[in-house]
Amino acid sequence: MADLTRLTAAETAARIAAGDVTAVEVAEAHLARIEAVDEKVHAFLHVDREGALAAARRVDEKRERGEKLGPLAGVPLALKDIFTTEGVPTTVGSKILEGWIPPYDATVTRRLKEADVVILGKTNMDEFAMGSSTENSAYGPTGNPWDLTRIPGGSGGGSSAALASFQAPLAIGTDTGGSIRQPAAVTATVGVKPTYGGVSRYGMVAFSSSLDQGGPCARTVLDAALLHEAIAGHDAMDSTSIDAAVPQVVAAAREGREGGVGGMRVGVVKEFAGEGYQAGVMQRFEESVELLRELGAEIVEISCPSFTKALAAYYLIAPSECSSNLARFDAMRYGLRVGDDGTRSAEDVTALTREAGFGDEVKRRVMLGTYALSSGYYDAYYGSAQKVRTLITRDFERAFESVDVLVSPTTPTTAFPIGERADDPMAMYLADLCTIPSNLAGNAAMSLPCGLAPEDGLPVGLQIIAPAMADDRLYRVGAAVEAAFQARWGHPLLEEAPSL
Amino acid sequence: MTVTDLVSYEDVLASYDPVMGLEVHVELGTNTKMFCGCSTTLGADANTQTCPTCLGLPGSLPVVNATGVESAIRIGLALNCEIAQWCRFARKNYFYPDMPKNFQTSQYDEPIAFNGFLDVQLEDGEVFRVEIERAHMEEDTGKSTHIGGATGRIHGASHSLLDYNRAGIPLIEIVTRPIVGAGARAPEVAKAYVAELRELIKALGVSEARMEMGQMRCDVNLSLRPIGREKFGTRSETKNVNSLRSVERATRFEMQRHAGVLNAGGTILQETRHFHEEDGSTTSGRIKEEAEDYRYFPEPDLVPVAPSREWVEELRGTLPELPRLRRNRLREEWGISEHEMQSVLNAGALDPILATIDAGAPADQSRKWWMGELARRANEDGVDLGSLPITPEQVARLCELVAEGSLNDKLARQTIEGVLAGEGTPDEVVDKRGLKVVSDEGALGKAVDEAIEGNAAIADKIRGGKVAAAGALVGAVMKATRGQADAARVRELILEKLGVEG
């Protein structure tokens, strides 16, 4: 039998449904793969072997009883450790939640279980999703399966690495400034940040509430679409979730694969180029634009002048919100508690716990945000950043008056070596230059592989951006590009990754 | 604590003009909390009415309680406020162990209701208009119980217990504009405002507003300015003044204390103060050297509240008659004076009186018993009229027994005593104690004859025209019948038998 870990999610589900293979066999194959390679990769923080096998057994029992199986029944998945899982540890990559066992499931977790997806475990991430390399995890970095000495992107580096090393065909990420898309780009996988409000945030530990968005990660556009439909949709537990029909992303992915971009207008954002962009990244991006033209799309150059201020606005809004969201970690009710020897005050115990439990980047952002919100500075910082946010949204609105989607490189460079930017926050922040505007505007965006950079042989990602609630356009264009590139390469790009 | 000489109240007013600001928190009586589905019932075991959201667990999110918003709008409308077309919640960031998220979800510069007023009536009938700056929605905190300290405060405690059942209960905070021009009547205005607000909240049915249960809590801000000066002085903020009487006392005490400090050339510190029920004083709490920085910002986890105008008008249609207007209407219907009405209010007798009338008693009888015997008993026992163990229906039955002549006033009082002692309903008490008026003319005639025989001298005086002396014989008959006779009838019989015109 072919290696079960190399199948797509769609193929896996079809084989299980047809009875060619059991869900337990699929789960065991992936658990074995994790055992074999994750010591090197370190994609998982926690593997829930028992839970995964139990879920797989339920799928097999359903099939034996003749019950109809859902489109992802029995497919293994790697869940970012930011979603609460009842009875299974959830750390958010932080020491402050070490040992915490949530008493409830996130809505995403619940929907995955309802779809009979087999959750293998929880994946590594930058602490509280703050970072672009997964080096900020309190539990050690994750290696990029293309080169284990390089970063797998961040904050969802565990999820992207799990996909790229064939430890799971599906993963869930969260994207506050690019944490789904940038890891996808540097590992040659597919990642989608849905429209803000498209996927419930209930049970997703908050970093920056107005920017955070959970979304699907996969190795193919169709797989991402299947996962997207499984987790998306209105949730009464999340006031900001959109009460409208989920865009038909699976249908769009299928149509796109049949060559569905003819007549679409594609905008190239002028501001996403220039200094800081690696030559090989720009070369692959320009080839992608050329490919879209060949597929029948009309290419239009678009200017979005406010995008140059996006990074600055982001680094005021996100820290401001996180300074408030993280205030609850006070050692009183859950998680780490340091220095409680019966002589210290609650304030002292809180201070000692935070000192020990939060990493440098988290502390940096909490301090930044506390300052930005403080009386007398609020208007100059948080207030101005919100104005920039409005301008960016308007730039997008204007652009989408004349084009259907926008494209850009996902991130300016390929995967950088672990440690290279660890002490240079500004260099690290630049990795999200092209992804942040979509978070600020709340629209939808995807990253998918568009080749390897000639100078280093590492993956390059193409970003597609669509208006809010037009997530289906991402899948239509993405599937068309994916099919065309694979026809050119003769195989999925990931097959070029070194074997571990 | 530095001891300050208090200035006599008259001297305060000779030099200073008081300015007040009242902040009242009302716990709404919704079935569920403001941002989650947990129950709000009082008295449950600690931490049994909690969920991920009101415990602030990682990943949890709030959802607004629509009934809470509706109550807030109705309160706003009853306070003559404008209702926001669009407003947001805001996070008020500060740290306290009983606050699960370490921020309170509140409203900041976009309150749901603003620019209103409440007319309050003082004891002499004068109406004073208190302007309302805003009414906004927020959530309550949990409750800390400090163990091991002497005073129950955190200072000196060995540890603290946290109960989050209260965390997330909906609160409406109602803030007045500075109240100026009250002068000597400032304490009375403060009390009347809080009393009127409480009546209004109860009439709206949005909360029981029981101050002793913490369902309504008042902070009294007070400053003095020299008479003739425009600029306000520095204020103190006396927290959690939790009875009407305390509101009045705290205001008065702070006026006298401020004047003492100012007269001695001192400066008032902007600080919070604790009120002490025992002696009506306040002591220093937390000094606000700089205004505390709560780092307010719009709550990103909640969507804006945008009540449609149609809904607001629909809610306006549900407003009850304002308590003040209702009281004035009742006063006129009953034909009593302002002063009498005030006594009814002060005694907390309005609701029981109305309930007794609803149960069939005439208004004057209902008033008479609640303001008389029952008020006296409540006062003796140190309880509210409402908590006496007698129902308005029972009082109405009592009135009925008196009206049909089965009881006289004395027997009725004994019946009340029996009911309050738990001996049963008025009818049961009358039966058990044998309290029915002696109406058997034969038995009564015999008792009268015996009284005339035993008091020949007095009987002669009466025969001689001294009708007033009949009282002594009435007393003798009443004694002989152990009070169970109708005194008026006894008097009639005596005069009849002695051949005298009454």
Image: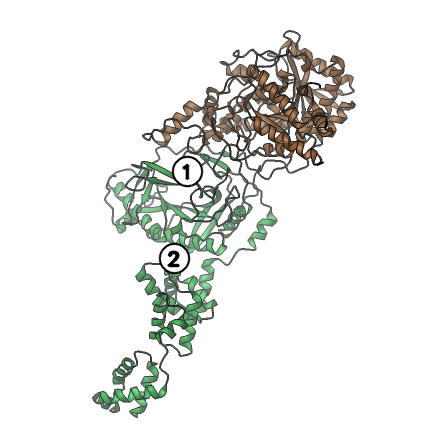
Chain colours: A brown, B green
Residue A454 image point, x, y percent = 66, 7
Q: Secondary structure at mark 2?
A: loop
Residue B429 image point, x, y percent = 38, 71
| Three-letter amino acid code of the residue under disc 2 | Leu
Badge nearest the viewer, 2 or 1: 1
* CB contact under 8 Å: marks 2 and 1: no
Q: Is residue B502 visible?
A: no
Name the disc covering residue B98, or none. Answer: 1
Q: Which residue does the image show at 41% across and 26% down from the upper left?
A: A353
Name the disc covering residue B446, or none. Answer: none
Between A322 and B343, the one lying in front of the other is A322
**Whether residue A230 is situated above or below residue B166 in the rendered picture:** above
**Whether residue A383 is situated above or below residue B363 in the rendered picture:** above
Between B366 and B14, the one lying in front of the other is B366
Name the disc covering residue B122, or none. Answer: 2
Q: Is residue B191 visible?
A: yes
Report in which chain the residue with disc 1 lies.
B
Q: Earlier in the sequence, mark 2 or mark 1?
A: 1
Q: Secondary structure at mark 1?
A: loop
**Which residue extends farthest bottom?**
B499
Q: Which residue does the image show at 40% across and 50% down from the upper left?
A: B213
The image quadrant that residue A2 belongs to is: top right
| Three-letter amino acid code of the residue under disc 1 | Asp
Q: How many tags in the picture? A: 2
- Asked if marks 2 and 1 fall on the same chain, the answer is yes
| Image quarter (top left, top right, bottom left or bottom right) of the N terminus of chain B | top left
Q: Residues within 10 Å of mark 2 (few under 14, many from 20)?
A: some
